[in-house]
Image (cartoon, rainbow, N blue to C red):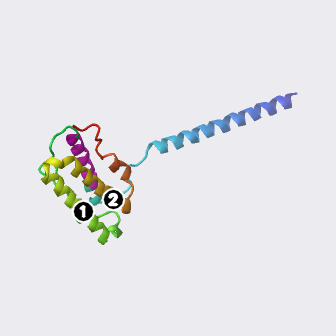
Amino acid sequence: MIKQISFITISLLILINSCNQQESNSNTDTNTEQKTIKDPNNPKPMALMMRKLASNCDSMKSKINKGEIVDSFSYPIMPFWSAEPTDSSVLEPLFFDNAKQFQLAYQRLMQNKSSQKENYTTLINACIHCHTSYCSGPLKKIRKLTLDYNATK
């Protein structure tokens, strides 16, 4: 009888100890997951410019939705095409053609104050078009920059 009680006690201690170790390991995993690094690498100048450009477009979207005019003084063009990219293989003719389309759309947006809604949409579509071919990661964020025509005046 004493042997059986000893065996059960030892078995329970081993079971409890192994459960505690699993909980400890899962807590360590949770802590590791919470410490996600947003930018594991130093972002390249082109990536930084693109982030600023996205922020500018978000601000322009708000202004245009309110019926306000955007101008090149408040939102200067950012020559991202001349900055160092994260992946230098993108620097090919199609990329520069897309950058040229972006420039043209930007110029139309800033020069034609009466059609800013349409020209802003053209600008964002130029971004979507390029990011479909290169660096598709930000597409979800870029698509959120499109105008809500129901909210505009």
Amino acid type at image mark 1: Gln
Cβ–Cβ under 8 Å for marks 2 and 1: yes
- Residue 54, magenta (yes or no): yes
- The image quadrant of residue 85 is bottom left
- The residue sitting at 12% across, 54% down in the picture is 111
Give the magenta-colored segment's residue range.
Answer: 50-64
Residue at the right extreme, as displayed: 1
- The residue sitting at 11% across, 50% down in the picture is 73
Tell me which numbered mark, 2 or 1, is placed earlier along the sequence: 1
- The residue sitting at 26% across, 59% down in the picture is 45
Question: Disc 2 marks which residue?
Answer: 129
Residue 106 is at least partly visible in this image: yes
Image coordinates for residue 5, horizontal then vertical, percent: 82, 28
Q: Is residue 37 left or right of residue 19?
A: left
Q: Is residue 11 left or right of residue 63?
A: right
- The residue sitting at 26% across, 45% down in the picture is 58
* Secondary structure category for the residue under label 2: helix
Amino acid type at image mark 2: His
Q: Is residue 27 left or right of residue 64?
A: right
Determine whether 120 is above or below 130 in the image: above
Most prominent secondary structure in the magenta stretch? helix
- Residue 25, magenta (yes or no): no
- How far apart marks 2 and 1 lie (CA) works out to 10 Å
Question: Disc 1 marks which residue?
Answer: 101
Number of other residues with Cα within 10 Å of mark 1, as a class: few under 14, some 14 to 19, many 20 or more:
some
